[in-house]
């Protein structure tokens, strides 16, 4: 079962050897959470773990969540709910496409019921009126918010770092809703610094993460820093430079990256290595949070040839 796989998994951390890393006198390690399961990005399992447990304990046999048509969270919810013996409903933003993309097809294959919601209603999806309406339509369910970030998600992402990571000086991760970085900050050792690379465009991310940490009472003084300039045009947007980097990195290291989150994160970290942000001797840990399932749909849409594994 997927959930027990997560519980017993000793995550594979590998070192990356590239001339430009050696030249700067630092060492770079990658925690391959993408290896947990092909259908779900690694960080999403951590975010769902305690939520699925809570859903079962609350007596609900169904979980309901929200996401875009290419969402890693949607597919991760479908796959892990199925493994946990729960039914799942995915409320998808926008019109039902004539031909479902690979993400939606796979979510359906994992037993998820898909329902499409127009964008205007979708913006108000967490309001009581909409939730009531969904309850009328689908019956009782355990609600997991879009992107999956809540207190139980952070409890899960606080388990990403383990004792073997104590030798790391910097922990680097991608940021969407912030649930992953919040757990990392919560569990980092005092000598470690967590660096977050936003996949979204905008300076709002600084306030958003500060609010999130405060809401979950996570002390964070000097424990983290955010980078907001590696979004390549915005969420799920890309530029040729990013695609070229992903291909080159795969060729040089064998590690596949996705264009929405991890590609931007790795680009940002490599850029900071080159510009001497990290003091010589630093051990840098990159969290590969997965997202590889989205590549097939990305390639179809943009006529690209990114590798999925
Ligand atoms: C969802 C996701 C993230 C962002 O995680 P948050 O907890 O929402 O910040 C990062 N990487 C991948 C691959 C994801 O799917």
Image (cartoon, rainbow, N blue to C red):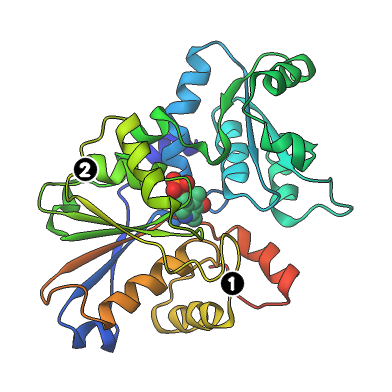
For this rendering, which residue is in front, 7 or 303?
303
**Most foreground residue, 139 or 268:** 268
Residue 142 locus on image (x, y percent):
58, 20
Determine whether 308 is above or below 103 in the image.
below
Task: Please say if the residues under marks 1 and 2 sit with CB atoms less than 8 Å apart.
Answer: no
Crowd band around label 2 with a 10 angstrom C-alpha radius: few (<14), some (14–19), many (20+):
some
**Quarter of image, res 23:** bottom left
Q: Residue 143 appears at what percent x and percent y?
A: 58, 24
Instruction: Tell whether 212 sits left or right of 85.
Output: left
What secondary structure is found at the residue carrying circle 1? loop
Mark 2 sits on what residue?
220
Above or below, 145 relative to 107: above
Q: Is residue 42 visible?
A: no
Task: Point out the residue furthest to the top here.
Answer: 59
Q: Is residue 272 visible?
A: yes
Residue beneath disc 1: 238
Residue drawn at x 60%, y 57% as measured from the top left: 293
Q: Earlier in the sequence, mark 1 or mark 2?
A: 2
Where residue 38 appears, as percent x and y from the top left, is 54, 54
Q: Secondary structure at mark 2?
A: loop
Q: Residue at x 46, y 63 (%)?
A: 262
């Amino acid at each position: 079962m997927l959930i027990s796989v997560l519980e017993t998994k000793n995550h594979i951390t590998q070192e990356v050897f590239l001339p430009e890393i050696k030249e700067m006198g630092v060492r770079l390690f990658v925690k391959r959470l993408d290896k947990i399961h092909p259908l779900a990005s690694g960080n999403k399992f951590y975010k769902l773990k305690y939520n699925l447990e809570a859903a079962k304990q609350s007596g609900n046999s169904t979980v309901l969540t929200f996401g875009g048509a290419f969402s890693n969270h949607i597919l991760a919810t479908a796959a892990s709910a199925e493994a946990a013996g729960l039914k799942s409903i995915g409320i998808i933003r926008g019109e039902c496409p004539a031909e479902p993309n690979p993400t939606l097809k796979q979510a359906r294959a994992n037993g998820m019921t898909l329902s499409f919601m127009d964008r205007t209603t979708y913006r108000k999806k967490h309001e009581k009126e909409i939730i009531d309406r969904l309850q009328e339509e689908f019956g009782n369910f355990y609600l997991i918010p879009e992107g999956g970030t809540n207190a139980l998600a952070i409890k899960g992402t606080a388990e990403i770092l383990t004792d073997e990571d104590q030798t790391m000086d910097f922990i680097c991760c991608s940021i969407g809703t912030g649930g992953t970085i919040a757990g990392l900050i919560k569990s980092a050792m005092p000598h470690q610094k967590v660096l977050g690379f936003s996949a979204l465009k905008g300076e709002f991310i600084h306030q958003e993460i500060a609010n999130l940490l405060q809401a979950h009472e996570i002390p964070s003084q000097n424990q983290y820093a955010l980078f907001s300039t590696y979004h390549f045009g915005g969420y799920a947007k890309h530029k040729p430079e990013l695609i070229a980097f992903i291909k080159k990195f795969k060729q040089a290291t064998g590690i596949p990256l996705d264009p929405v989150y991890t590609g931007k994160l790795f680009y940002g970290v490599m850029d900071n290595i080159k510009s001497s942000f990290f003091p010589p001797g630093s051990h840098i840990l990159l969290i590969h949070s997965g997202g590889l399932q989205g590549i097939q749909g990305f390639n179809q849409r943009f006529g690209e040839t990114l590798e999925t594994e």
